[in-house]
Amino acid sequence: MKQLTTKEMQGLFHVYMEKLAYMRDPKGLYEPIEYVLAIGGKRIRPLLLLLAYNLYKEDVEAVFSQAAALETYHNFTLLHDDLMDKADKRRGKPTVHKRWNENTAILSGDAMIILAYQFLMKDCPTQYVKPVMEVFSQTALEVCEGQQWDMEFEHRNDVSVDEYIEMIRLKTSVLLAGSLKIGAILGGASEEDARKLYDFGIQIGLAFQLQDDYLDVYGDPKVFGKNIGGDILCNKKTFMLITAFEQADAGTRTELMHWITAGDYMPEQKIAAVTAIYNKEKIGELCQKKIEDYYGQGMRLLEQVQVPQENKRHLLDFVVGLMHRNL
Amino acid sequence: MKQLTTKEMQGLFHVYMEKLAYMRDPKGLYEPIEYVLAIGGKRIRPLLLLLAYNLYKEDVEAVFSQAAALETYHNFTLLHDDLMDKADKRRGKPTVHKRWNENTAILSGDAMIILAYQFLMKDCPTQYVKPVMEVFSQTALEVCEGQQWDMEFEHRNDVSVDEYIEMIRLKTSVLLAGSLKIGAILGGASEEDARKLYDFGIQIGLAFQLQDDYLDVYGDPKVFGKNIGGDILCNKKTFMLITAFEQADAGTRTELMHWITAGDYMPEQKIAAVTAIYNKEKIGELCQKKIEDYYGQGMRLLEQVQVPQENKRHLLDFVVGLMHRNL
């Protein structure tokens, strides 16, 4: 059997997702699920699962159902997060609570959690059912914890960098890490390899999220895909803002606070002023340094995984590609 | 080992639930869960699981975690249903979205689904993990389907008795049936016994729900625990109302429609008028007949379960007790 390229894998998995049979009555429950899953996106989590599995075994289609479980769970989190954040759009399309209503968003999201568990169990070799379920449940619960911290941080002005890192670890990293670990378990990896791949996922997840924070300020709007300065306008407590508060002298801090509490301003003016403070305090460089630290640590962990280096090429290329997607 | 009485079992399980260790940070996520689980209630589903297990094995404490899973899932459904129905109280206490807020109710409910899966897996013998998970996921998904039908029926005036029965089967019966089946599987029952116990649960679940519909009209307010006529006042499409519409002649139907669409009325007057129609059409008797049918069918299924009749006494007494709790 020849090894599939990542693109071929993506293509096959895309077809699999489109054919996934869960639709039944009542349509009012399942149509919003179909809608959310069809929006697509980058399918990063299932790909990580497949690529981790592929370090050990070639027949990646054997674990498509588990990959679909991760994608379903991730999309459930987007659905309920959008509801909680009252977001109108997701990837340019109306969110479920806008297109249908809030109750539909609640109930269809609930059903997606259960569907994710069903996909996870489907054709799962008996010896892996328990470890896979344990990693998944632990991960899924931690994602909820991350969302809870994120919501609580909105109402706090004393969030530390450590607390922020812990929040993004839970909200973003653990699901990437869990995807890799589940792929490794299903591939028959040693416990140590599975743990290393998990830790690798944590590190690159943190790097990705900090990069997102960085690009919100310094990204190329033509490449970034979101408007530059979005986090600044909504006073999001990102690594950039928290670090600026920690680093700045009293005068600069007052200036920063002025912009955060200002009720009436021109958006471009606020973005320019806060960015100027970041420039002065070299927050961009600090953020880049942190990203490199996490990224480098992740790469060292991947190196230690006990499979031939050439087997890691696809996983490595995929992660490098994600890392540079917006630079 | 001597067999525990149902009361002893309830007592031990109550202590187990109180000591259940899931509380951790962020408190904002886990405190509402603790609050909901502490409200208690009759704990019917875990008891059914334990009693079904007890048909085959005596060490019921071995499956307390699975019983807790069912109770956690049931309480999740109450939490999210109350949010969707905008109910202010549950068992006399403020609902989670009232005591905290809607986002807390959404997220803590989500976490409860995952906790339920964790409890279900805990100390579950390897050979039963897969069948138990399959029954649970299927059941959990069907409960969501039942809730969706229930919400859709509110906006429809053409719900048939068959559709109504299917809705309450999904919303109420399958979780009772699933509890019994999971208990049976864990006890090592034959597939046929497990299926019979499941079907028994479906039948008694339908009987319970129809009894609830009946007692809303004809119950003793001192015993029923809810105000008599609540369903009538909110035009709930119960077996009583749907059957009245199906049975009545054109004149009576018009009268019934008048009360359903009336905007301005004295509550007692509406209850009295609709009850009078039910009396005239003998809806109470029709409902009682239906209850006896389901109940009798359930009992015949239980009789067929291949364990000595004396082993079934506790389960039987418990179900009879539930059936007569409000008469």
Image (spheres, coloured by chain):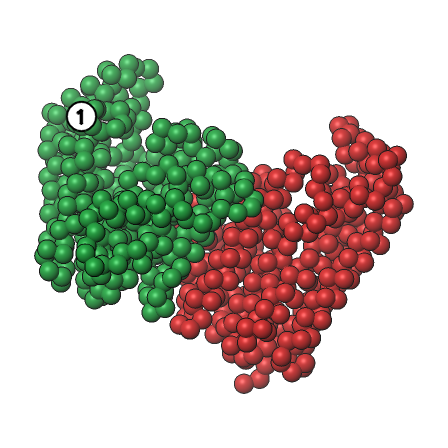
Chain colours: A green, B red
* Residue A129: percent from left, percent from top: 36, 65
> Relative to the observer, which residue lies in front, A58 or A318?
A58
The residue drawn where x is 67% and y is 82% is: B310
* Residue B1: percent from left, percent from top: 54, 85
Q: Is residue A79 above or below residue B200?
A: above
> Relative to the observer, which residue lies in front, A247 or A283?
A283
Q: Is residue B23 above or below residue B245?
A: below
Quadrant of the snapshot with the C terminus of chain A = top left
Quadrant of the snapshot with the N terminus of chain A = bottom left
Image-quadrant location for residue A180: bottom left
The residue drawn where x is 21% and y is 66% is: A190
Residue, far bottom: B1
The residue drawn where x is 64% and y is 49% is: B167
- From the viewer's perspective, tell me whether residue B163 is left or right of residue A29: right
Badge 1: how crowded within 10 Å, few (<14), some, or many (20+)? some
Q: Is residue B312 visible?
A: yes
* Residue A45: percent from left, percent from top: 29, 47
Image-quadrant location for residue A78: top left
* Residue A315: percent from left, percent from top: 18, 50
- From the viewer's perspective, tell me whether residue B210 is left or right of residue A183: right
Kindly identify the amino acid type of the residue bearing the numbered disc 1: Asp
Residue picked out by circle 1: A220
The residue drawn where x is 22% and y is 35% is: A212
Q: Is residue A55 above or below residue B90?
A: below
Q: Secondary structure at mark 1?
A: loop
Residue, far right: B280
> Relative to the observer, which residue lies in front, B254 or A252?
B254
